Image: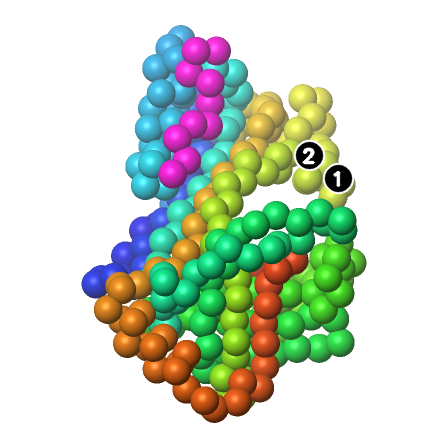
Amino acid sequence: MHISQQPTTYTLNLANRIYTEKSLVLQKKFVEIMQEKFEGEIYTMDSDKPSETAKKINQWLRNKTNNKIDKLIDEQNPDLSDILIINAIYFNGSWQYPFKTSSTIKEKFFPEENQRIMVDMMRTVEFLPFAEDENVKVIGLPYKNEEISLYIFLPKVKFGLHEIEHTLDGSKLLALAKSCRKFGRVEVRIPKFTIKTNFPMKNALQKMGIRRAFSMTAANFSGICARPTHIRNFVHKALIEVNEGGTQAAAVSAIEMVFKSNRPIKRQFIANHPFLFALIKNETILF
């Protein structure tokens, strides 16, 4: 799936692809579901040309992520399985209310107790969706056209991220995001950041009790193909970049008005310690 909003709003690439060994014949119904329901693509791998196959997979990934994620498989020593499932996401957007670049300053960030680092801290004061409960503050930062917003969930206890991670599942994150309202002006400070993930889905799924799918003897994928097979690798790679965004002219106009106002600020959102974030589109968590 590719969604591109023009001009200068956002680009969202969601890509799902399954690679199968060339001798595998997939069930027709499975192919229809994969293509129609998940907008996924199915390709065969040539095990006789592993390096060439790895290069093609990596090139596809680069295309889907705007060259931000450049490598999934070692092209010199590729290790190809019968079935390779890939999910990739790339997002780049412009803020509805851009941060002013000249307002970004070096400030302290506390990743762990007794540890501090200097980061580029973006700053603004704006009418933004805000909510809080006894454990967490939430701010919504909308991108242009406001279909997608970045929600940041900041523990009220400086090093309390580990505790709230155990209590906030997807439904609770969405509920908190939906509870955000524009009550007034909020002073916001969040660090610029870029995150790349290479999440070992196999280990995570096995810890959740999903083990048969990875077993040579117990796996049952008869709905996918008639030949006995199993999943050996499940890869999820993602990238998100958060910076001031927007054009300088828009930022100067909006932010100058805010910083030179003498009206009282009712709320603060100072993200100088670990937090959760979620990229949400129409009540769907993308990242």
- On the image, the x and y values in percent for residue 194 come to 47, 47
Residue 266, compared with residue 15, is above or below; it is below
Q: CA distance from mark 1 to mark 2?
A: 6 Å
Residue 247, compared with residue 31, is above or below; it is below
**66 on left or right of 132:** left
- On the image, the x and y values in percent for residue 158 come to 73, 62
Q: Secondary structure at mark 2?
A: helix
Image point 32% across, 41% down: which residue? 66
Q: Is residue 179 visible?
A: no
Image point 64% across, 65% down: which residue? 154
Image point 55% across, 57% down: which residue? 107
Q: Main secondary structure of the magenta part?
A: loop
Around disc 1, counting alpha carbons within 10 Å, would you say few (fewer than 14), some (14 to 19), or many (20 or more)? few
Q: Could you tell me the amino acid type at mark 2?
A: Asn
Residue extending farthest to the bottom is 263
Find disc 2 in the rendering and name its residue. Answer: 203
**94 on left or right of 210:** left
In the rendered image, which quarter is residue 52 located in? top left
Image point 52% across, 22% down: which residue? 82
Find disc 1 in the rendering and name its residue. Answer: 207
Return the residue nearer the eye: 83 or 28. Answer: 83
Task: Assess whether residue 213 is covered by the magenta stretch.
Answer: no
| Part of the protein shown in magenta | 68-77
Residue extending farthest to the top is 48
Q: Could you tell me the amino acid type at mark 1?
A: Lys
Return the residue nearer the eye: 253 or 176. Answer: 253
**21 on left or right of 168:** left
In the rendered image, which quarter is residue 202 located in? top right
Q: Are marks 1 and 2 in contact (CB under 8 Å)?
A: yes
Residue 287, compared with residue 283, is above or below; it is above
Residue 74, compared with residue 112, is above or below; it is above
